[in-house]
Image (cartoon, rainbow, N blue to C red):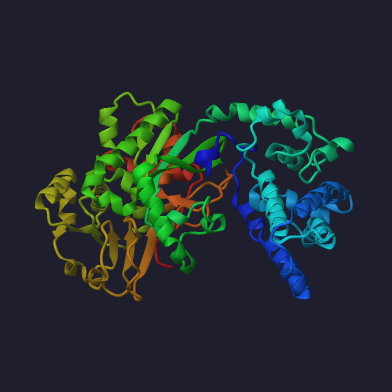
Amino acid sequence: MLFLTRNHRIIQKGVDFDQVDKEWNWDNFIILQALIASLSICMFPHKFANLPVWETKGLIAIVVMHVLVSEPLYYWVHRFLHGNYLFTPYHSFHHSSTVPQPVTVGSTTFLEELLVTAVIGLPILGCSLSGYGSKTVLYGYVLVVDFLRCFGHSNVEMIMPHWIFDSCPILKFILYTPTYYSLHHSEMKTNYCLFMPIYDAMWNTLNTNSWLLQKKITLDAGKSSRVPDFVFLAHVVDVSSALHVPFVIRSFATTPYRARLFLLPQWPFALISILVMWARSKTFLLSFYKLRGRLHQTWVVPRCGFQYFLPFASEGINKHIEEAILRADKLGVKVISLAALNKNEALNGGGTLFVKKHPNLKVRVVHGNTLTAAVILNEIDQDTVKEVFLTGATSKLGRAIALYLCQRGIRVLMLTLSAERFQKIIEEAPANCQKNLIQVTKYHAAKNCKTWVVGKWIMPGQQRWAPPGTHFHQFVVPPILAFRRDCTYGELAAMKLPDDIEELGCCEYSMDRGIVHACHAGGVVHSLEGWTHHEVGALDVDRIDVVWKAALKHGLQPVSGAPK
């Protein structure tokens, strides 16, 4: 949860896709220990059944055996695993995770996990054989060990304030901290202990910077971290997609969002979270990545897609967006790009509302629709396509697409009931191109047109007017249903980020890894180019090709939505 931990993190790097993939089977250690425990109970069912619920002497016995047996044994096992012959085949895999996370605990080889299980199992066995075993102590010991291991790998200093160690210095040798373990991951030849640094002190492998660094991190926790160069201001699409975030199900967030059966039981909890966010939450930091030394962050307005269509919710949503823009301006962010519904024309005029209200903004507000239009237009084969059917024709994006195509001799059937709005677009077109813009009011007018550009959601009944072989390009959120099997459907306008991107570890909605919505990419291009103008309101048709060439120049790659 970066919105809680961003100023408390030890290693500031992000967890990228490579690390997530390496740690995909992190729960193997849980399966292994569950199998061993189940086998033990099956072998001695009566002895386990006769164990008391609580035994005070058992608690004392298991603590003593942990301190005197498990701790030194783990220290030497761990130290030997760092030897020349054992490290590469058996322990280097664990250290390949550059940013420790709680699940990194289980990112180990089978031999290593067997050794750890044996070390943990010895106090349980000893306590049981001594006659002082109890169910609470046995289960409690395993839970405490797992918690402390995850705590050490958390990469966050939030639980143990430095003043505890200043007030009681002996604690430094009794319990480690996440900083202590992170130093082991980064320097490797120090801090081998399980939980008790006294054994590192005894055998001269204690890193003396452990508590100085821990104190520095906790003291600096209240200070602002690095200022991002670019911010993408997103929103929740729907209730289920609220679960598609790294702090809920990390592995799920590294794959493109799709409705999955396992999400169904969690839907009520997601809905409750959405409602709580509606009542209490502020715009929050979700994720980040780095590009050519620049820090790019994604912030989220705590509103779901359906809420943008509730008339009474508009004021609150605009307040969140405005506060985010002002916060970015105060921090020194260079560019903030508005996602899909955050730049809705009816909501705030594509960002115009905020720029007019705050004319002295230093941060550049960008809706990114110029690049969105460029992506859609470059998906259309303008050498062979002679006619296009366009829905959402009077939106700022639809208008730009219509004007661009008509200037290139392509006939555009614009679905709109408003003759006044259509007339305004006609007046913007060059006189010799106006004949290429045709107003239509019914879907059946496109029954012979095989290129549909969809900017307004259409139902299956409306899709049936498209002739077989039609391809649906689209810039509507959420995407339309792929109802017709004899037609093809493009994805939402998107671009692949440059190959030199770093520390990216989650997918953006339904996009593949490294691919972002065109409005996001548009903000990235604005930032990389160092443009100083706001990109809000109506699109400048003359800049479509300029923005497209700039995107390609900086290494962003088109993701074709054309039929294969």
> Which of the pair 384/305 is nearer the observer?
305
Describe residue 324's horizontal placement relative to residue 78 as left or right.
left
Note whether 415 is above or below 505 in the view shown.
Answer: below
Residue at 68%, 46% in the rendered image:
153
Quick check: 429 above or below 162? below
| Residue 120: x %, y % from top left | 78, 56
Measured as percent of width and height from the top left, residue 219 is found at 61, 26
- Say which of 49 and 556 sits in front: 49
Can you see residue 314?
A: yes
Identity of the residue furthest to the top in this view:
360
Left or right, 424 with respect to 348, comes to: left
* 283 lies left or right of 210: left
Q: Where is the C terminus found, in terms of image quarters?
A: bottom left
* Residue 344 % position (x, y): 27, 46
Give the number of marks: 0
Identify the image quadrant of residue 22: bottom right
- Residue 366 lies, with reference to residue 77, above or below; the image says above
* Residue 493 seen in render: no
Question: Residue 499 versus residue 407: which sits nearer the camera?
Answer: 499
The residue shown at (35%, 54%) is: 376
| Nearest to the observer: residue 544 or residue 4 | 4
Q: Position of residue 315 (x, y in %)?
A: 25, 40
Residue at x 32%, y 34% (from the top left corner): 322
Q: Residue at x 76, y 28 (%)?
A: 169
Q: On the rendered structure, is 457 left or right of 221? A: left
